[in-house]
């Protein structure tokens, strides 16, 4: 490959620009090539984000009087969000959900799996990995129904196993359920990321730690963790972003009962689409976009400092 | 106790041996518990579709394939699978076409601010997720009359995946040897001919990768079609599945079980067979 890409040194020094543009595309045609993709991105990704800023400052509604004559209300939506107890409730639930299921649950379970399986081979490993992966790849609405069946009050498998007939898990412990559910769905990512990270830890360092008499957890603390610190950060930020933006718990509990699982994404949906308060919903979306921006910028910063 | 002497001789190592055994058992037990945590919910998907009388519980089935016949008789079930195929194929076609053109141009011509553009797009696509942008997207589609159309869903999905697609494809394009294009150009090939006949065939693995990746993204996506499509006859399987278990009074488990399996199978197959070729990068993609 490397021999093929080498061009004569003369052309490389004389026409650096030309040598790059080997197909003779030229700037104008290049722009025409990039154009359609940029247009789709600008219209359906960039524009909605920008429009959120404006919509959030209006009292836009889907139906009713305000639907006909929308007016500019300034920061009123934000003011009412910050005084609305259900907004704070949903923010609190989101923090618990992201912290417990993403940062703690998926990361720890994913790491545990990667660490335990690093020296296991054969059918045990492939079965376990296949199970974790299968839970991750099946579509969200199938995820949700599998858990509805599992937790069913009358004939669910969980009540049969635990011998607790009639226990309504989705009503009694809704938050615990969606946390466990999300761990079940998403652990595959952390497992994969950490097992590739662990395989890159220099064996010589582990070997010398073992020679010095370090126990398993000491090797973990002194050799492994420092080596994969970058991966841990990447994993945490990605998981945080995804868990924060997931809508799948809606398929399981629809935010209920009584808003007990109404995480931010579900709260926005309930307010804006069935609730029809598009202006208020846009203000909430803006808050979500800003939090996303914050997480993503942190991620990019970490990525840059690694290089 | 025949091993008594043996035990006495190896007193110190025997106890550490025992400890090691216990540790080993605890380790295996932990893995079994984790395995069961993942397996138990999944088991329903394996047995219920083949059970003549499925319940919510996992049990040994009375084997039958009649649930799949029931699926064929339901007017919405098959239609929704076709809708999913249509949405996935449409988004894939658009993404592959626009993504290939854009990534090729970005790989070969130094447009000022190219790297900033690439990173900016990637940042944008990770911030403006389906959930965060559902309100303005819904509003935009209402305003331009694409609400309730599959075209609208395809465009929104394409906008969401294109930044990642361009980013990944540009890497593949960068690795296409430039000498191929140079010689094609010497023979008088036009830029679009070079792209079609030289670059695309060489970059085929990359294009296949992003095509499959896009299909997986669209296939399972619930929120975008749920918000934008109101008419049941145009809804994809992801939304129909939800309708099946929420809107009918008594959930039809024979239909739901067979439908779940048919709906989940394509992505399962893609991951476990096709994906072996691509490895970890597939998961690194932004799965929402």
Image: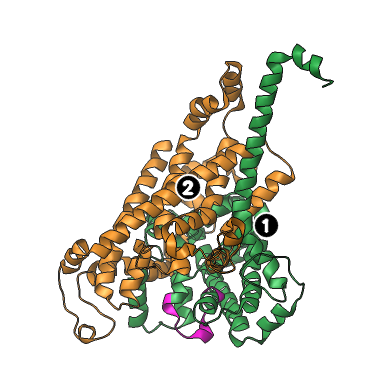
User: As drawn, is B151 to the left or to the right of A267?
Assistant: right
Label placed on residue B272: 1
Q: Are marks 1 and 2 in contact (CB under 8 Å)?
A: no
Q: Position of residue B73 (x, y in %)?
A: 66, 87
Task: Please name the residue that numbered disc 2 is placed on.
Answer: A105
Q: Position of residue B155 (x, y in %)?
A: 45, 74
Query: Furthest residue to the top?
Result: B9
Q: Identify the main secondary structure in magenta.
A: helix
Q: Chain of mark 1?
A: B
Q: Circle 2 — which element?
A: helix
Residue at image coords 60%, 78%: B81
Label the orange chain with its letter: A
> Which of the 4 image quadrants contains residue A52?
bottom left
Magenta residues (range): B227-239
- Classify 10 Å Cα crowding around label 2: few (below 14), some (14-19), many (20 and above): many
Q: Position of residue B192 (x, y in %)?
A: 56, 67
Is A220 rendered above or below residue B66?
above
């Amino acid at each position: 490959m490397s021999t093929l890409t080498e061009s004569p040194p003369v052309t490389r020094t004389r026409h650096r620009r030309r040598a790059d543009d080997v197909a003779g595309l030229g700037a104008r045609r290049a722009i025409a090539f990039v154009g359609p993709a940029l247009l789709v991105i600008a219209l359906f990704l960039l524009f909605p984000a920008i429009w959120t800023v404006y919509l959030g400052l209006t009292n836009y509604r889907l139906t009713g009087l305000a639907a006909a004559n929308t007016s500019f209300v300034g920061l009123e939506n934000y003011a009412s969000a910050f005084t609305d107890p259900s907004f704070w409730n949903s923010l609190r639930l989101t923090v618990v959900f992201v912290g417990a299921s993403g940062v703690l649950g998926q990361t720890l379970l994913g790491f545990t799996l990667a660490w335990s399986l690093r020296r296991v081979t054969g059918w045990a490993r492939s079965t376990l990995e296949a199970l974790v992966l299968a839970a991750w790849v099946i579509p969200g609405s199938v995820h949700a129904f599998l858990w509805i069946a599992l937790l069913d009050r009358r004939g669910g498998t969980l009540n049969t196993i635990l011998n607790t007939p009639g226990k309504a898990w989705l009503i009694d412990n809704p938050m615990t359920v969606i946390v466990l559910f999300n761990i079940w769905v998403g652990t595959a990512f952390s497992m994969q990321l950490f097992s590739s990270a662990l395989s890159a830890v220099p064996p010589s360092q582990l070997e010398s730690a073992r020679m010095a008499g370090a126990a398993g957890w000491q090797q973990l603390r002194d050799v492994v963790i420092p080596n994969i610190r970058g991966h841990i950060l990447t994993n945490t930020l990605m998981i945080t972003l995804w868990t924060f933006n997931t809508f799948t718990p809606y398929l399981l509990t629809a935010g209920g009962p009584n808003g007990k699982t109404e995480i931010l994404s579900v709260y926005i949906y309930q307010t804006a689409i069935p609730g029809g308060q598009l202006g208020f919903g846009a203000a909430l979306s803006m808050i979500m976009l800003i939090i996303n921006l914050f997480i993503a910028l942190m991620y990019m910063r970490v990525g840059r400092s690694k290089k | 106790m025949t091993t008594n002497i043996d035990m006495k001789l190896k007193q110190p190592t025997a106890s550490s041996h025992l400890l090691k055994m216990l540790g080993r058992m605890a380790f295996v037990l932990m893995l079994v518990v984790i395995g069961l945590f993942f397996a138990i919910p999944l088991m329903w998907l394996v047995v219920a579709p083949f059970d003549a009388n499925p319940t919510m519980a996992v049990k040994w089935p009375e084997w039958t394939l009649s649930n799949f016949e029931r699926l064929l008789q339901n007017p919405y079930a098959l239609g929704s699978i076709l809708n999913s195929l249509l949405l996935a194929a449409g988004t894939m076609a658009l993404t592959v076409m626009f993504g290939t053109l854009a990534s090729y141009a970005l790989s070969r011509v130094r447009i000022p601010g190219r790297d900033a553009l690439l990173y900016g797009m990637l940042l944008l696509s990770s911030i403006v997720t389906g959930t965060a942008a559902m309100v303005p997207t819904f509003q935009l589609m209402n305003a331009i009359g694409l609400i309730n159309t599959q075209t609208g869903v395809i465009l929104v999905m394409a906008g969401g995946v294109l930044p990642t697609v361009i980013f990944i494809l540009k890497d593949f394009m960068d690795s296409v040897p430039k000498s191929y294009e140079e010689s094609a150009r010497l023979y008088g090939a036009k830029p679009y001919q070079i792209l079609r006949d030289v670059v695309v065939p060489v970059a085929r693995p990359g294009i296949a990768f992003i095509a499959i990746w896009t299909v997986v993204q669209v296939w399972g996506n619930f929120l975008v079609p749920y918000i934008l499509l109101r008419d049941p006859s145009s809804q994809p399987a992801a939304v129909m599945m939800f309708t099946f278990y929420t809107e009918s009074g008594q959930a039809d488990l024979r239909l739901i079980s067979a439908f779940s399996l048919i709906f989940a199978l394509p992505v399962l197959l893609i991951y476990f067979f096709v994906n072996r070729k691509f490895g970890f990068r597939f998961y690194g993609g932004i799965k929402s």
